[in-house]
Image: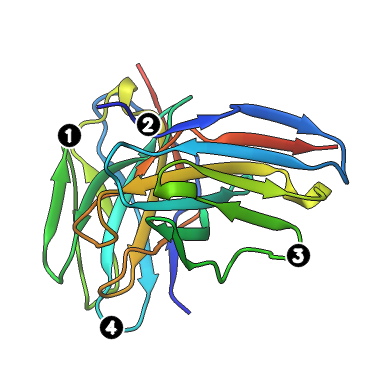
Amino acid sequence: GDSVTQMEGPVTLSEEAFLTINCTYTATGYPSLFWYVQYPGEGLQLLLKATKADDKGSNKGFEATYRKETTSFHLEKGSVQVSDSAVYFCALSAYNTDKLIFGTGTRLQVFP
Amino acid sequence: EAGVVQSPRYKIIEKKQPVAFWCNPISGHNTLYWYRQNLGQGPELLIRYENEEAVDDSQLPKDRFSAERLKGVDSTLKIQPAELGDSAVYLCASSLRGSVDSPLHFGNGTRLTVT
């Protein structure tokens, strides 16, 4: 069945460091891909999405590119801030559905 | 706009007891979801409603779990009887319409501990 695999955390970085959180997927057809973020004490929020191959989703300085050839959707940010500390979830929905399948989440800790 | 509201935030019960969770979606959102998130895992869909109709309940353990969405607005998820393995965070989400172009909005969840 469809699945999402993301790198284990925690990822620990200093402020202004470059961030990459890896995400790969297995799916039939052409899924849509998402990154959700969960800040401490808050609910999951959509960070960005891409609905077709080679699309780039971006928001709040984060970006991810839908790579069909490598079945990947890695999350990147050029310069992280302490306020980016959160748990990041990669997710997919199968073509033409809204049922989300999540990865296990990656905790990011950014220190000043 | 007000977000998805869930209550209670925390619940501690003994095994074999019943428990219920309540969700109030964003006004006007027709699609409502219940997810379960085990510790260290991503959320997993339990049930999805389109208005008052459950259109996907394939992952709901129907021997002990039940859900309802009366009048297509608020929803209640019930577990009876609870087991130790039911300890998790139960998340409610809603969307304007059930399509990939309509993002899900999640509540803060109810953390259930079964002792």
In the rendered image, which residue does mark 4 sit on?
A29
Question: Separation of disc 1 and disc 2 at Cα?
Answer: 18 Å
In the rendered structure, find residue A60 and report the number of the disc placed on it.
1
* Relative horizontal placement of residue B68, taking residue B105 as reference (left or right): right
Label 2: element kind: strand
Look at the numbered discs 2 and 4 and tell me whether their residues touch, using CB distance below 8 Å.
no
Q: Amino acid at mark 4?
A: Gly
Chain label for disc 4: A
Q: Residues within 10 Å of mark 3 (few under 14, many from 20)?
A: few
- Image vertical order of residue B44 relative to residue B84, above or below: below
Q: Where, by quadrant of the figure, is residue B15 drawn?
A: top right
Question: Separation of disc 4 and disc 3 at Cα?
Answer: 33 Å
**Residue B68 in picture, x, y percent from top left:** 56, 52
Chain label for disc 2: A
Question: Separation of disc 3 and disc 1 at Cα?
Answer: 44 Å
Q: How is the rendered protein coloured?
A: rainbow
**Residue A26 in picture, x, y percent from top left:** 39, 76
In the rendered image, which residue does mark 3 sit on?
B63
Q: Is the residue at mark 1 from the same chain as the one at mark 4?
A: yes
Q: Amino acid at mark 3?
A: Asp
- Image vertical order of residue A45 relative to residue A99, above or below: above
Look at the numbered discs 1 and 4 and tell me whether their residues touch, using CB distance below 8 Å.
no
In the rendered structure, find residue B115 and report the number of the disc placed on it.
none
Q: Is the residue at mark 1 from the same chain as the one at mark 2?
A: yes
Q: Which marked residue is nearer to the observer: mark 2 or mark 4?
A: 4
Seen from the viewer's position, the closer of residues A16 and B100 is B100
